[in-house]
Each structure stands twice: as structure tokens, then as C-alpha cells.
Amino acid sequence: MLRISNVVGGYGRTMILRDIDVQVEPGEIVAIIGRNGVGKSTLMKAVIGLIRPATGSIGFKGQNVSHLPADRRAHLGMGYVPQGRGIFPGLTVEENLTMGELINTNRARKSLDLAYRYFPRLAERKRQKAGTLSGGEQSMLALGRILVGQPDLMLLDEPSEGLQPNIVRQIGDDLKRINQELGTTVLFVEQNLGLIIHLAQRGYVMDKGTVTASLGAQDIVSQDALTGHLAI
Amino acid sequence: MLARIASEVRPVLDGVFNAFYQYQDSFAFLVLSAIGLAVIFGMMGVINLAHGELMMLGAYITVGAARSGVPLPLAMLVAGAAVGLIGAIMEVLIVRRLYGRLLDSVAATWAVGLILSQGMLILTGPSIQGVASPLGSFRVGNTSYSWYRLLLGAVALALLVALYLLFMRTRFGLRARATIQNPEIARALGVDTARMYTVTFALGSALAGLAGGLYAPTATVVPFFGTNFMVEAFVTVIVGGANVLVGSPLAAALLGAINAFLAQTWGLYIARVGLLVTTIIVIRVLPRGMSGLVDRWRLRPTGAR
Ligand SMILES: Nc1ncnc2c1ncn2[C@@H]1O[C@H](COP(=O)(O)OP(=O)(O)O)[C@@H](O)[C@H]1O
Ligand SMILES: [Mg+2]
């Protein structure tokens, strides 16, 4: 589904990512773990195409997309939720969801119903300005928005950030259902160990702009196992 | 008895009509002067100082087409389309390179404006023969009024409605509004933001060209035609604020009343001073213009957790 090979890149001349290799198979849920400032968000931006790698390549569904801008990668089926969710506060809930339509242009029929099915709360609020939603509702909106496009790969940057623990669990359940029912592949950046254990099947640990460890299912079973790996 | 009442009421009605006529005339002038500038500023944050010259081009193209036999309304539409195309070229060649650099884009568009007006002066001389104002006039009381000026009022309203529908009811409009709010996210969701900006700039330019064409029959068409509109255009955009759809009509409604009243009472010079003074007061009280006030009110929390 996704193959990141030897990627080096950053902002202007400052290189943040150093020789990153990450692979995600179809249908997997994979976590990227690491402390603040190690380059996780930068990696996600490189995958969606908001920054271009200086060297290395990014393959998506067997196609080299390194040279494509973000909008073209979205058309190919990547759905990206940035850190902080990136909703459009001045647009209504319905308008925000409609903005997901351009994702995955292969899937012919786009309907907001898919978003409303997984997040019924959004249907109740569809005429409301997105800026007036609570944090949890804004997270649902950001996920619902990409769901409308039926992406093959979801790229989620810290979906738990700023949310109450019960809502984090709820979002984890929703993502699991989406993955199982729709077969959507998920690559997510996360610092919340609870959500990582709940959701991830595998993971990569990042430090100082590069991948320092690859975690299998057995490494993600408990907080203790995880913190052990993160301490390296 | 009835005749006496009629003779007393009549002048009052004449006065009311006169006030309405002057008001809608000012309103139309403000809206049509500003609309292209407002779309480009509101949707892209670019201050297009070539706006007046784009209006001038619209006037020249309208006159040129009309004098070579094209029906006048069609000539105006042709002018809008042609100036829109010129705007698209201008965006791709120059403006695109200067996003996020407000002063550079101001200087660059100013330079384009100078080239256009000086170029027109060299090409066609100090003025060209215009076209007559169509539709003739009618009398109410002792005053004569122009049908065409009334039509301009209706056109201004129709354009505002059309823009509202374009930006609020179409996919293009939705994507344009999303792009202003957050270009990076819009792009990550599949919007070709570069093309969005080109189309928006072309739309603003086309509106300037159309407006220039609409006013071509009412004034002498000269290379500095555009300067007639610049004060009104800027004042409306500044008072209106960044949200074109809300700001421009409100600003034109307010400024139109002030302008019509002052022009009627003390003349055009005082009316212009009045517009500028009002603008200064509005930006002191509402730094983000009238649409800033409206947005703040609309985005207020509505009791959601
Ligand atoms: N837009 C930017 N321009 C320049 N440097 C940036 C930008 N965004 C982040 N950085 C820098 O890149 C590094 C990695 O940031 P980031 O990828 O956001 O880390 P993480 O998501 O792991 O917390 C940090 O040192 C940060 O200061
Ligand atoms: Mg981050």
C-alpha cells in the first residue's frame, strides 16, 4: 500500500527526516511513535505531499508518487488528517464533509452518508459552523471528511490530541470498525500509549528524524512493553 | 379637493423618487467599482492595483466592439471575458510568484496598471470616440432621469446575487472558500489550489472588465478611465472587509447612502471627503470591516459543549 524508501527531507534547507524506511501493507493499522519534535508530523506531510523529499521515494499502491503534489496524491486515495485536525471553522459541518469528495477519484459515488453512518453526531450538527463544535466532534468531522472520499489509506497525525480519555477510546473503536468494515489501511502518528495498544497492529519508533525501531504485535501488547521500547 | 391633495403629495413623492434614484445610483457605482477588487482581495488576500486599468480595458474593448457592430450588451460581456483572460495571464506570469508577499504584489500590480494605461495612451491617443448612453431618459416631476442608470442599479444587485450563489451554492465556491481558510488542508484534500487562484483572479478581473464596460457609455473613454473608480472601489473594499459576499453589499449600502446624501446636498467633492472620513471611522471602530463584525457574530458559540 505504502512504501517509504530512504526518504530525506524537511523544510527548505533544514533536513528533518534522515533516511526513513517505512512500509505499510493493505488493510494494516500501523503506528508511528516518538517524542515531540522528532519529525513525525514532517513524515506525514512528506507522505501526503505537502513537503517534497529531497531524496528517496514514496510509493503508493505500486506507483511512485514522489513527484506528485498533495492534491494528486489525494485523488489517488490518500486521506490526510493533520495534527490539530485541520477542519475549516468557517464552513458548516456539511460543507466540511463535502470537501472530502475529491479524495480517491476512482471511487465513483461519493456520499456524506458514510460519514454520518460512522459519526451520527455529525448529522445532527450538519448546518452548524464547524468552529462551534467541541473537540471530540471536530475529530469526528476530520475523520468523517476523509471517509466521504473512501480513501485506501488514512494518514492520521495524533488523532487523540486534546481529547478526553473516553472520547479517545470511542475514536479508537470507530477507526477499528472502519478498518474492518471498509478495509481501509491506517497509518497514524500517536503519543497516547493507550490508543496505540488499542489500535495498532505494528509500529515504528522514530527519534531524531529517523526510524530507530520496528515494533511487532508482541511489542504493543502492554504499556510496559511499549515504554521499554520508547526508552531506547 | 382630490386635486389639491394630489398637488401637495406629488412633490413629496417626486422627492422620494429622487432620493431613491440617487441612492441606487451611488450603490451601483460603489458595487460595480469594487466587486472585482473585492473578489480578488477577499478570496486571495491580494490587493490588485491594476484594478482600475482592468476596468479601463473593459471600457475600451466594449467601445471597440460596439463601434464595430457588436450589440452593446454583448460587447460588454465580451469585454468581461477578454479582461478575465488577461487577468488569468497576469496571475500565471506575475501574481502567482508573489503570494504571501503583500507589498511585492501591490508594487507589481501597480506596475502592470501603469504599463496598461501608458500603453493605451501610446496606442490610441488621449481619448477615443465613445458610445452613446443607451435607453434614453424619463421625467419625474421637473427632473429628468436616465433609464440606463436605473438598469445599472439592477445589474449591480443581480451581480451580487449571482456571486452569492456562485460562492455559496456551487462546488467551485465551496472549494474557493475552503482554500482561503486553509490552503494547505484544501490541497491535501485534493483541491488544485494553484488553479483555484488563477480562476479566482480571472473572475475578479472579468468583473472589473464588465464593470468598465457598463460605465463606458456614461463617461469619456480615456487611458486613465480607471482612476474614476479607484476611490470608490478601495473605500468599499476597506469598509466591507475580507468577506466579499457580506462585506461589499453592506459597505455599498452604507456608503451609498452617505455619498448620495452628501452629493445631493453639498456636491461631489464633499461626498468624496465624506466617503473617506467614513472609511477612517469604520476602520477605527471595526478593524476587520463590516464583514468582520458579521463573522464574529455568526461564529459565536451556540451552546454546544
Ligand atoms: N513548517 C516548519 N518549518 C520549519 N521547521 C519545522 C516546521 N515544522 C516543524 N519544523 C521542525 O521540524 C522538527 C520536527 O517537527 P515535527 O515533524 O512537527 O515533529 P513531531 O510531529 O514529531 O512532534 C522540529 O524541530 C520542528 O521545529
Ligand atoms: Mg507532530
Image (spheres, grey):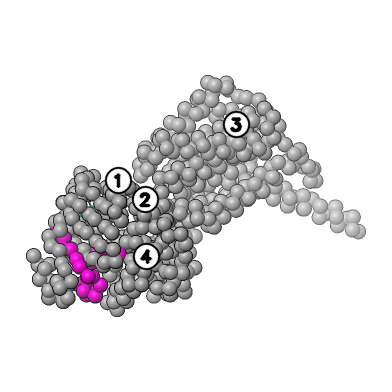
Q: Helix, strand or loop at disc 4?
A: helix
**Magenta segment: does it hold A205?**
yes
Foreground pick, A121 / A219: A219
Q: Confirm whether circles 1 and 2 share one chain.
A: yes
Q: Residues within 10 Å of mark 3 (few under 14, many from 20)?
A: many
Chain under disc 1: A
Q: Name which of mark 1 and mark 4 comes first in the sequence.
A: 1
Observer able to see residue B253: no
A90 with respect to A23 (left or right): right
Under mark 3, the amino acid is: Ile
Tag on residue B61?
Answer: 3
Q: Give the residue at mark 4.
A: A142
Q: Name which of mark 1 and mark 2 comes first in the sequence.
A: 1
Quadrant in which the C terminus of chain B is drawn: bottom left
Q: Give the residue at mark 2.
A: A72
Q: Helix, strand or loop at disc 3?
A: helix
Under mark 2, the amino acid is: Arg
Tag on residue B105?
Answer: none
Foreground pick, A43 / B222: A43
Q: CA distance from mark 2 to mark 3?
A: 39 Å
Q: Which-is-in-front pick, marks 1 and 3?
A: 1
Q: CA distance from mark 3 to mark 4?
A: 48 Å
